[in-house]
C-alpha cells in the first residue's frame, strides 16, 4: 500500500507487485498544520479502512512513516494484527503510535527502544537487507558497472534522489583530487537533472567517473566501492555495513527529529564511519577526510572491519520467521 506518484509506486510496480493506493496526510508542526491534519486524517483513515476491508489481509506489516501510520490505524480498526519494523535510531510519531497496537515491533537500532511506550513487544533485529547485497566479488561489481578494478573507487550516494549539497561539495573538491586522478575513480549517483553537467566536470578535470542518475544494481555498486560518501538513511548504512565499506556520512539535516544524525553517530561510535554535518564547513571537512582515507589503507581496513562487525545480517530471516510463527498459531 502506498501513495500515487511516489517513489514507492515506481519501485513496487517495477518489481512486479500490485500496489493499493491509499491517502496519507503528514502533520506539519504549526498551528495551521495541526488543524488541517485534524480534519484530513480521519478521512484518510476511513478511506484506508475501506481498502483493507476489501483486501481482507491476515496481517499488516508497517515500516514506519506517516503512510504506514495511516494503514496501521486502519488495520487496527479492522481488527487486523499489525507488525511494525522501524529502521531509524529515532522513530517518528507514526511508529510511536503503531508500537502501542503492534503485535511486535522490530527495531534496526537498539537505542531506539527507549523512545517507545511499549517495551515488551520490541525485538532488536537490525534492519532487513536485500539478499543480493554483499554477494558479488569486487571484480564482478567493477565489471557490471563499468569501472576500474585498479583504482580506489569512491561512491557518492545521496539517497535514491541524489543530494544536491553533497553533489556541490564533491564538485568543489574535484580539483583537489586531480593529483590522485590516476588512482581514484568516482561512482556517482547524482539524482535527476545533474548527470550531464557532472560528467562534463569530471572530464574537464580528468577524473575517471561512472555518473548515473540512479543505479539499479546496488549490489554491484557496493561490491566495487572502497569508500562511500552517503546520507544517514538507515537501510543505506546497513547495506554499506554488510559490505564492510568505510563510510563518510553526511546526514540530511532536515530529517524528522534529526534521525539521520542519530543513525550516523551509531556507526561513528563503532569506528565504522566518520560523520560530517551538512553545513558551511562541509566541503573542507569532506576534502580533508577523503584525502585522509585515500592515503591510509590501514585506517580504511580498520573501519571496514568495524563496519562488518556491527552489522546484523540475519534481520530479514528473523523478522520473516517471527511473522510466520504468528500466522501458524
Image (cartoon, rainbow, N blue to C red):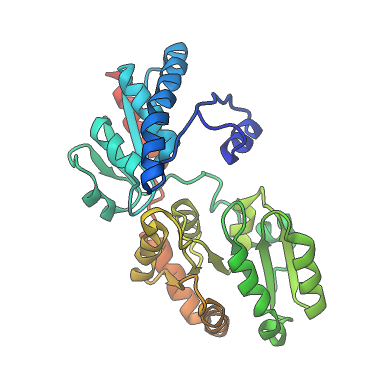
Q: Please indicate whether residue 83 sits to the left or right of residue 239 in the image.
A: left
Q: Please indicate whether residue 63 sits to the left or right of residue 4 in the image.
A: left
Q: Disc count in the image? A: 0
In percent of the image, x 66 and y 57: which residue is there?
141
Corner quadrant of residue 142: bottom right
Corner quadrant of residue 178: bottom right
Asked whether 85 or 166 is in front, the reply is 166
Quick check: can you spot residue 151?
Answer: no
Quick check: can you spot residue 120?
Answer: yes
Corner quadrant of residue 123: top left
Asked whether 223 or 49 is in front, the reply is 49
Whether 196 is drawn above or below 314: the answer is below
Whether 281 is drawn above or below 217: the answer is below
Q: Position of residue 218 (x, y in %)?
A: 61, 52
In percent of the image, x 25 and y 30: which residue is there?
101
Asked whether 1 or 155 is in front, the reply is 1
Residue most extreme to the front: 32
Whether 229 is drawn above or below 281: the answer is above
Q: Quadrant of the C terminus?
A: top left
In percent of the image, x 31 and y 23: which residue is there?
76
Q: Position of residue 84 (x, y in %)?
A: 34, 36
Asked whether 319 or 297 is in front, the reply is 319
Amino acid at each position: 500500500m502506498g501513495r500515487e506518484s511516489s517513489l514507492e509506486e515506481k519501485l513496487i510496480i517495477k518489481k512486479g507487485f500490485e500496489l493499493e493506493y491509499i491517502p496519507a496526510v503528514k502533520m506539519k508542526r504549526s498551528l495551521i498544520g495541526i488543524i488541517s491534519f485534524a480534519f484530513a486524517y480521519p478521512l484518510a483513515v476511513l478511506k484506508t479502512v475501506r481498502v483493507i476491508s476489501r483486501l481482507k489481509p491476515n496481517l499488516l506489516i508497517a515500516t514506519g512513516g506517516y503512510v504506514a501510520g495511516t494503514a496501521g490505524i486502519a488495520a487496527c480498526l479492522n481488527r487486523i494484527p499489525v507488525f511494525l519494523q522501524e529502521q531509524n535510531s529515532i522513530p517518528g510519531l507514526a511508529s510511536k503510535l503503531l508500537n502501542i497496537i503492534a503485535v511486535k515491533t522490530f527495531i534496526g537500532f537498539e537505542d531506539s527502544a527507549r523512545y517507545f511506550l511499549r517495551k515488551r513487544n520490541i525485538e532488536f533485529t537490525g534492519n532487513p537487507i536485500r539478499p543480493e547485497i554483499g554477494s558479488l566479488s569486487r571484480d564482478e561489481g567493477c565489471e557490471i558497472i563499468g569501472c576500474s578494478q585498479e583504482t580506489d573507487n569512491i561512491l557518492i550516494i545521496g539517497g535514491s534522489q541524489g543530494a544536491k549539497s553533497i553533489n556541490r561539495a564533491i564538485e568543489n573538491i574535484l580539483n583537489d583530487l586531480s593529483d590522485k586522478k590516476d588512482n581514484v575513480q568516482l561512482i556517482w549517483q547524482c539524482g535527476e537533472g545533474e548527470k550531464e553537467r557532472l560528467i562534463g566536470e569530471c572530464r574537464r578535470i580528468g577524473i575517471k567517473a561512472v555518473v548515473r542518475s540512479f543505479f539499479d544494481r546496488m549490489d554491484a555498486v557496493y561490491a566495487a566501492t572502497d569508500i562511500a560518501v552517503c546520507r544517514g538513511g538507515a537501510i543505506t548504512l546497513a547495506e554499506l555495513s554488510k559490505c564492510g565499506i568505510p563510510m563518510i556520512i553526511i546526514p540530511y539535516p532536515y530529517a524528522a527529529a534529526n534521525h539521520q544524525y542519530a543513525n550516523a553517530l551509531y556507526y561513528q561510535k563503532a569506528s565504522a564511519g566518520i560523520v560530517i554535518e551538512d553545513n558551511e564547513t562541509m566541503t573542507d571537512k569532506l576534502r580533508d577526510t577523503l584525502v585522509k582515507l585515500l592515503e591510509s589503507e590501514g585506517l580504511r581496513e580498520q573501519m571496514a572491519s568495524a563496519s562488518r562487525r556491527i552489522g546484523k545480517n540475519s534481520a530479514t530471516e528473523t523478522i520473516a520467521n517471527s511473522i510466520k510463527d504468528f500466522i501458524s498459531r
